[in-house]
Image (spheres, grey):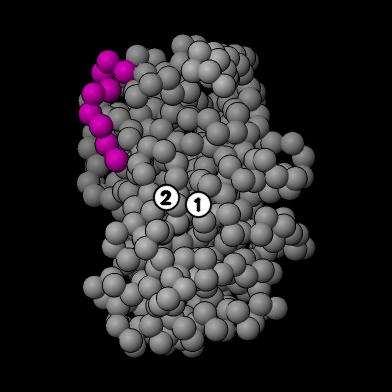
Amino acid sequence: MSRRTARRARLVAVTVAAAALQATPAPAAVGPPDGVITWGASAYSIGDSAADRGYRMVVHTSVGGRDARIRLSNAFGHQPVTFDSVYAGLQLKDAALVRGTNRRLTFDGSSSATVEPGATVYSDPLPGTLAAGSDLVVSLHTPDAAGPATGHWMALQTSYATRGDHTAEESGAHWTETIGSWFYLDAVSVRPPAATGAVVALGDSITDGWQSTSDRNRRWPDYLARRLQKAHTTVKGVADEGISGNKVLADGAGPSALTRLDRDVLSQPGVRTVFLFEGVNDLKAHSGVTSADLISGYREIVDRSHDAGKCVVVSTIAPFKGWPEWDPAAEAVRQEVNDFVRSHADDFDAVTDFDRVLRSPYDHERMLPVFDGGDHIHPNDKGMQAMADSVELNSLDCARR
């Protein structure tokens, strides 16, 4: 394809997407979405908030569908926070939006919403179609925010901030401050074709994408989402609920996987499968965690997910020799946990072996250099893609009632 043809194809795609988001009469307000999550990011406390602050945040969708809705979270706030103006549109370039796509979101019919501490709120559906693989831009303004801010610190995506309310503007002229976090926004859902479902990746910094290329959507769940869009499967949605430094058993870098399972995973609309890939931070913390402890944590996540009607795919823990906190004791526990996962596949709905995908054939305790992002624990883009390519897609397309 020539550069001119490729450029024309991109222009057509943007024009079609823009037309799909043109304003139409707003529907009556409804409750929590009955659709499918198309994007997600785990919320936790990310520092202090500020009043009269605007955030213009870029997120990349997985599954496409109608009637997009967003979820705003004040899960870690100590006082109510008001969002007096919230808009959603399509990214043109940087903070600028595609003409005609930026539209106001409402909440139970109101143009503003106040979210109590510890709570979340869904917007009303935004009529029109949001395509798979879209760069959706959510702009919000908080006139009175104070105290701890809820969000996702390591977005690996350039977003924008400003003072005052410039949410309705499609120009990026007032959005001159770049930020690398998502504030308050923790989920986007759509209504895709019937019987469509989603998978949620529950993990740590590897799932969060550290050492993948920023602004290119090269985390392993991103690669997985692109595979699913092309595959003959009814699972199309992917939500990345990874937190850098997160543990299965203990709070620290965000609440533990056990603590956040309900809010980050089981409460999301349309989830069919939970993909559990976590545990290395429990091991390298040298807190005395044994293989029995970690396996017990896995079992609890599986049991609670099954009780909620979700399938669970569990992955082995990837190698990390060369990371400063690696030692033979932690390695021994890793091997014990991985042996359990492989030998007890019937305890889960499926098993994926990221350890075998990433490890060196010459030293099974170390990551293959071509996949190593440089710190010996986080894969680079090639490693992320290899992980996603190793997932058996049919294992995600299961049903449990």
Label 2 Cα crowd, 10 Å radius (few <14 / some 14-19 / many 20+): many
Q: Which residues are magenta?
A: 172-180
Tally the numbered discs.
2
Position of residue 367 relative to residue 135, above or below, is below
Q: Position of residue 65 (x, y in %)?
A: 65, 32
Q: Amino acid at mark 2?
A: Asp
Q: Amino acid at mark 1?
A: Gln
Question: Disc 2 designates what residue?
Answer: 381
- Kindly state the secondary structure of the residue where label 2 is placed: helix
Q: Position of residue 387 (x, y in %)?
A: 52, 58
Main SS class of the magenta portion in the image: loop
| Residue 178 sits inside the magenta stretch | yes
Label annotation for residue 280: none
Asked whether residue 285 appears in the rendered view, the answer is: no
Question: Disc 1 designates what residue?
Answer: 385
Asked whether residue 297 appears in the rendered view, the answer is: yes
Picture quarter containing residue 322?
A: bottom left
Label 1 Cα crowd, 10 Å radius (few <14 / some 14-19 / many 20+): many
Position of residue 317 relative to residue 186, above or below, is below
- Kindly state the secondary structure of the residue where label 1 is placed: helix
Q: Are marks 1 and 2 in contact (CB under 8 Å)?
A: yes
Position of residue 3 relative to residue 74, above or below, is above
Q: Name which residue lies at 61% across and 53% down.
A: 199
| Residue 60 sits inside the magenta stretch | no
